[in-house]
Amino acid sequence: MICQYLHIVFLSIDFYHNSYVSKKKPQNGELTALEKEYNQALAKERIPIEHVNRRLKIFKVFSERYRNRRKCYGLRCNLLATIYNYDLD
């Protein structure tokens, strides 16, 4: 039952207005030129975000399991994001 729920949640990502998912190639078919262009534009937007994720994963808080108190997690995430933003300036 949980697996079915997770599958439904994963499929419903398309319905949110602020999420974008690349177009998948149909089975035994090809993507149209417009779909390929959409996927490339989406990838170009995603690249800077992935670079930020990579820089933040250098701090082990984001890349590994957090083993400290849960209350401090948000504070530490904000501090690391502040350090990252300060480094950009």
Image (cartoon, grey):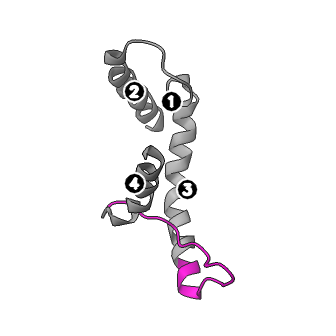
Name the mark nearer the viewer: 3 or 1. Answer: 1
Distance in Å between CA atoms under marks 3 and 2 = 21 Å
Label 1 or label 4, whichever comes before in sequence order:
4
Q: Amino acid at mark 2?
A: Cys
- For marks 3 and 4, give the CA distance: 25 Å
Instruction: Tell me: residue 24, above or below residue 82.
Output: below
Residue pointed to by mark 3: 47
Q: Looking at numbered disc 3 in the image, what kind of residue is underneath it?
A: Ile
Q: Is residue 44 left or right of residue 82?
A: right
Frontmost of labels 1 and 4 is 4
Residue at mark 1: 62
Marks 3 and 1 close (CB-CB < 8 Å): no
Which numbered disc covers residue 9?
A: 4
Residues drawn in magenta = 18-37
Q: Which residue is mark 2?
A: 77
Q: Say which amino acid is labelled 1.
A: Phe
Q: Is residue 26 magenta?
A: yes
Frontmost residue, 75 versus 68: 68
Q: Secondary structure at mark 4?
A: helix
